[in-house]
Image: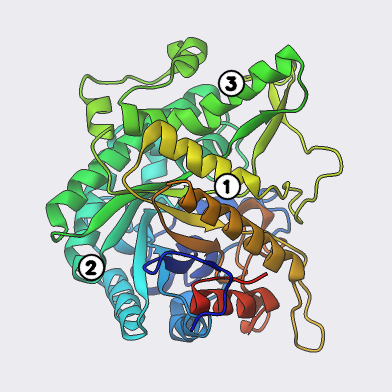
Amino acid sequence: MPTADALFPPDFVWGASTSAYQIEGAVRDEGRGPSIWDVFSHTPGKIADGTDGDIACDSYHRFPADIALMRELGLGAYRFSIAWPRIIPDGRGRINEAGLDHYRRLIDALHAAGIEPFVTLYHWDLPQSLQDAGGWTNRDTASRFGEYVHAVARALGSGVRRWMTINEPFIHSVFGHLLGIHAPGLHGVRPALAAGHYLLLAHAEGMDALRAEMAPGDEAGIALNLAETAPATDRAADLEAAEHADVYANQWFLDPIFRGAYPTGLLLQFGDEMPEIRADDLRRIAQPIDFLGINHYQRAVVRHAPLVPPIDIVPVTPPGAPVTATGWEVYPRGIYDTLTRVHRDYAPPAIYITENGAAYDDRPIDGVIDDPDRERFIHDYLLASLDAIEAGVPLRGYFVWSLLDNFEWNEGYRRRFGLVYVDFATQERTIKRSGRWYAQVTRDNGLSG
């Protein structure tokens, strides 16, 4: 019998998340083509510690051992992404059967272990050949994505019941196309707005492809990073900044998906710089989804900053607030606020927390990784999530970011989010204290203390 004090619904899904470029390695194996992250990470000065994802966690070769770790953690589900350049190395045309075979083996092994695959179809690793043709600033890329999704769903659909089209289009648009700190490293409002629209159009193309290939009862959605916004002070300028931040961080992608329109605030400021929006685009983007994945790490506390174009807003950390190793505020109430707001204002039929977690400076001592801060972080965010369920939010599952310490994008290997510690020199894995604790949560389907 469960020993937990706070129990989740009996069918609640417990999982962990990863993404292909961050863990797979094997970037030249079995016909895989180059991605924008291969090129970006090998560009001097782009990655904080000068590393790349060529090997990462070597999970392409080590996935059976990683699935054994998942079983130790009691996971009922595993969210991973498929690398587009493994399936269609040039982004269009020839399908690489060796890439499909790899994911068939992974999916079969997950089922044999009693773990359900949750598949993300795009987690930022665009084939470089498509980037050479304009990438996400080119409308044609959305059509190429639809072709890729057809190929994957046709080949792997018998083993997958839940799909996500795109991961975090906001981050990919802003970090990759406005700020230039992620691949492909572009800078400008126009590239960012174009990328945002064409990623949403790719979501529509992907949904069309999935609907054509999925079996009855299968489900498809999208994963958005969302966060409640708050003003740094009660000054009018900061209150207005928080409202604007909500437009960019949340409404920019929620409104087209659920309301078939871009938020007025976005169009008022940037309407002249938006790409061409054809007559049928927003109707297609707003087609029904079966669930929404929410990635949540922190709330967005902001202040007005008139010398910081293009939006005149900067994030701040409240004085004295606890923070993770990335400097992100620990504020569990934020996940409750995000879940209840999305449920109230957009009413998705089901929600999964597809990423939530924290980076800390984990170090092994006598072979043990003691990380009570991460344990407390997940505990408190789960309690807030349970409060949201009790408030009526249709939350169906929770996925920790991440299963493994991994290549953390422009931070390289400096930031460790995993339930499992990875020694990147030897590839030895060690379950952390937080992982052992999470295994107890998954067994009990609830929390104690």
Asked if 267 appears above or below 429 in the picture, the reply is above
- Cα distance between the residues tagged 2 and 3: 41 Å
Q: Which mark is residue 335?
A: 1
**Are discs 2 and 3 less than 8 Å apart at CB?**
no
Q: Nearer the viewer, residue 278 or 447?
A: 447
- Cα distance between the residues tagged 1 and 2: 33 Å
Q: Residue at x 78, y 80 (%)?
A: 364
Which residue carries the number 2 mark? Answer: 156
Which amino acid is tagged 3? His
Scheme by which the image is coloured: rainbow
Question: How would you rate the neighbour count of disc 3 (Cα within 10 Å): few for under 14, some for 14-19, many for 20 or more?
Answer: many
- Looking at the rendered structure, the secondary structure element under dot 2 is helix
Asked if 216 appears above or below 179 in the picture, the reply is below
Which amino acid is tagged 2? Leu
Which amino acid is tagged 1? Ile
Task: Tell me the quadrant of the picture where the C terminus can be found.
Answer: bottom right
Q: Residue at x 25, y 55 (%)?
A: 219
Q: Residue at x 72, y 13 (%)?
A: 236
Q: Is residue 363 visible?
A: yes
Q: Which mark is residue 151?
A: none
Which residue carries the number 3 mark? Answer: 244
Between label 1 and label 2, give the one nearer the viewer: 1
Q: Is residue 171 left or right of residue 373?
A: left
Indicate which disc, 1 or 3, sits on the residue closer to the N terminus: 3
